[in-house]
Amino acid sequence: MQNRLSGEQLMANKSDRYFLSQNRRTVSCSLNRELLYLAKRYNSSRLSLKAGVEYFFGSAILTNDFCRYNDIICIDATRVILRDRSSADDYIHASWMTMPDQYKYICTQGPLQETLEDFWHMMFCERSTVLVQLCNFVEGKHEKCSQYFPSTKGSTKILTMIGNSSFTLGQTMTVNHFSYVVWPDHTAPFDPAPMVGCLKLCKQLASGQPITVHCSAGIGRSATFVAIDYAWQKIISNGETKMIDVLKEVRQQRFHAIQSPIQYIFLHM
């Protein structure tokens, strides 16, 4: 037996649909205004940082061949210095990112073919046992990162040929490698939950040692990932925080960190 709506019920349903339609428009307009406001805050912050903060890039300028992108260089004060190297050979495109509780991450660019040895040298010397990869090796037609591990299980990848025959054998380190390669460049994930879950697991496995995070340039996806923890710690400590302050503070450690308005908006989710 078919259920038929009375005239009053039909009018009520039409009224409900009209209300919902209008409400969706109101919510959509409010959301668009809020997103526009956040994008403006982000852009104004970029201008103020360029005008008001003094950076030193001497090491990066002298070693520009080791930068994946010529316009993205390291701040001297926070760059990772390769241990057991001379001052002429201690550069890697990586920055220390210190959290409010003094825990440290390493944000780095996707290794170049000629910096693969330096990359693993850094990982080993800093005892970084957790590595987070947030880009694919190739995206579209562009290389974003050189492959820094063997493609076949059980095989070996030769990083460099060393002339000195004096070696210390037996030193090994297990690295937990997390790969999240569905995060497109300059954008942000639709749902923050997987990133938060990954972050918690990484910190658990790291046991207090620095977590190394890379994408291609090491400033967009990587810095956004690290900024999640930075913002969370400030909220836990202070009860609240302003994301514009988070943006400014992480950029004092990694130049151009959080690369786009979308990534900045993502932190508010």
Image (cartoon, helix red, strand yellow):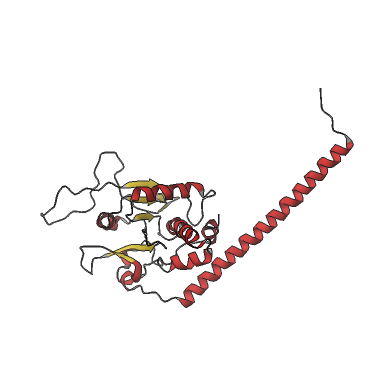
Q: Percent x, y for residue 38?
A: 59, 63
Q: Is residue 15 left or right of residue 26?
A: right
Name of the residue lying farthest toward the left: 165
Name of the residue lying farthest toward the right: 7
Nearer-the-camera pick, 74 or 206:
206
Tell me the quarter of the image containing the C terminus. bottom right
Seen in the picture, residue 17 relative to 70 is either above or below; the reply is above
Q: Percent x, y for residue 105?
A: 37, 58
Residue at 35% from the left image edge and 67% from the top image edge: 78
Q: Is residue 73 left or right of residue 14?
A: left
Seen in the picture, residue 4 relative to 152 is either above or below; the reply is above
Q: Is residue 119 left or right of residue 227?
A: left
**Residue 5 seen by the camera:** yes
Q: Percent x, y for residue 85?
A: 21, 64
Residue at 45% from the left image edge and 56% from the top image edge: 229
Residue at 30% from the left image edge and 55% from the top image edge: 113
Nearer-the-camera pick, 30 or 259:
30
